[in-house]
Amino acid sequence: MARMTGMKDKMKIRGIRQRWLANSISVVLFMVVLAVVAFSVAMSRYYYDAMEEGLKARANSAASFFRNYTQTEYRKTAKNYVDTFAEKSRLELQFIEPDGSILYSSYGLTTGTMPQTPDIPRAFEQAVMHSWRGRDPSTNERIMTATAPVLYQGELVGGVRIVTSMLEVDRRLMLASAAAALVGFALLAMLYISNLFFVRSIIEPLSGITETARRIADGSYGIQLEKTYDDEIGDLTDAINDMSMKIRQAEKVQTEFISSVSHELRTPLTAINGWAETIMNGELHDQKDIQKGMGIIVSEARRLTNMVEELLEFSRISDGRFTLSVEPLDLKAELEDAVYTYREFFRRDGIILNYYDCPEEMIPVSGDPERLRQVFCNLLDNAAKHGGAGKRIDVTVRVEEEAACISIRDYGPGIPQAELPFVKNKFYKGSSKARGSGIGLAVCEEIVDRHGGTLTLDNAPEGGCVVEIRIPIGT
């Protein structure tokens, strides 16, 4: 199975490489071909135009020489002109009769023949120079011609025609185009090789990241990738490493939470079962002992209920089912109810609960009274649980800057400074040995946040811990 997965990964990687190279190389290939074609066309036009202008200049120069000659003089002088033509190795000089036949030719072999190219009749009919390029009908060779009419007093006496082969020019153009294509494809090959190394520098790290992500998915939480690039790949590596560590931490917290909750549930259940069996078996005869046992059962049952309620609240927050029933209320009255309820409980444990009132008769806010009372009770219970050793808890309420401020302070050992940033995190219990699920503060903070307020927790300067709640005042 693992082998099949590895093969699929390699196929995917090859697919990415092939798509990358195909997409980039195809575009460059198109551009290279376009550039070579454009270069070839430009070179052809340049050479052909230059060649044509040269032929026209020579034909016009020769025709101008015979401009004041009669037909007889034209024929007589044309023979000498052909014999002394200096460029006969490259060009063929022809003198044309008015009927289109060749009177004299510097090559000699074409004398008396009738060229079938359109430049001659056009030049004679329109009495202006004409050029032409194409294949010679008699030899099938690619040639270029320029024909200039020779006129005497407006009458056509003949024409001068310059002919040259295009073989050498075509060969040079082909070599130039081939060189351009070779340069273009050399650049393409260099680009391909550089792209190959570039893609490899991306694919190989991605392959490692994919394998690590799969191992994390299979349960190897906490494994780390080596960061080799300080770029987007490096950022992805950091993100994977951070995810891996956070998953390991979450797994650890979850495991500790399950263990803690199991222990927290087992302790009250053991007490309830023990006392219930003792009372049921009739082992207690003193009424006070029975009442004490029943009190323990009620107390532990209440603690179990509170713990289950916390878990249910956290579950509602996690899956989005946590809602508030907002209504106008007196925050001060809700706080006082919680204080009066817990004052008697704390007195039994030897803890004094002091309440410091504010001058305002009421503090109007918009909120959910049940949820806010839940926050107050939870924080008071935490103060007694973690700071009850100080045997004193102070609750203060005041109004500051359009906000109700409630502080709950205990006089216990406080919270280690290193643990302060984490105490409100879900499932976090730190070094505390007190009973609890570790989610009470997280639920309280969520409720306060939903009311638009803040919940802060810090150590008091004189010792102990102080929790402060700020909720905006409004009707």
Image (cartoon, grey):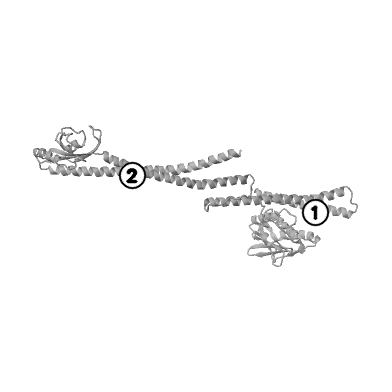
Q: Is the residue under label 2 in contact with that under label 1 (CB below 8 Å)?
A: no
- Residue 154 in view, yes or no: no
Residue 97 x/y as whole percent: 14, 35
Looking at this view, name the residue that lies furthest to the bottom: 462
When asked about the image quadrant of residue 472, the answer is: bottom right
Q: Residue at x 31, y 40 (%)?
A: 174
Residue at label 2? 39
Number of residues whose C-alpha sits closer than 10 Å to that of mark 1, classed few (under 14), some (14–19) or many (20 or more): some
Relative image position of residue 225 (x, y in whole percent)? 58, 50
Q: Relative to 108, is 191 above or below? A: below
Q: Which mark is residue 18?
A: none
Label 2 neighbourhood size at 10 Å, few (<14), some (14-19), many (20+)? Answer: some
Could you say which is closer to the camera, residue 321 or residue 304?
304
The CA span between labels 1 and 2 is 95 Å
Foreground residue among 376 and 244:
244
Residue 28 image position (x, y, % from top left): 41, 44
Earlier along the polypeptide chain: callout 1 or callout 2?
2
Question: Please, what is the three-letter code of the amino acid marked with disc 1?
Answer: Ser
The picture places residue 427, in percent across and down from the top left corner, at: 69, 53
**Residue 172 visible (yes or no):** yes
Q: Nearer the viewer, residue 143 or 365?
A: 143
Element under label 2? helix
User: What amino acid is found at the position of numbered circle 2 in the picture?
Assistant: Phe
Q: Which mark is residue 299?
A: 1
- Looking at the rendered image, the disc whose residue lies closer to the viewer, 1 or 2, is 2
Q: Is residue 429 above or below residue 158?
A: below
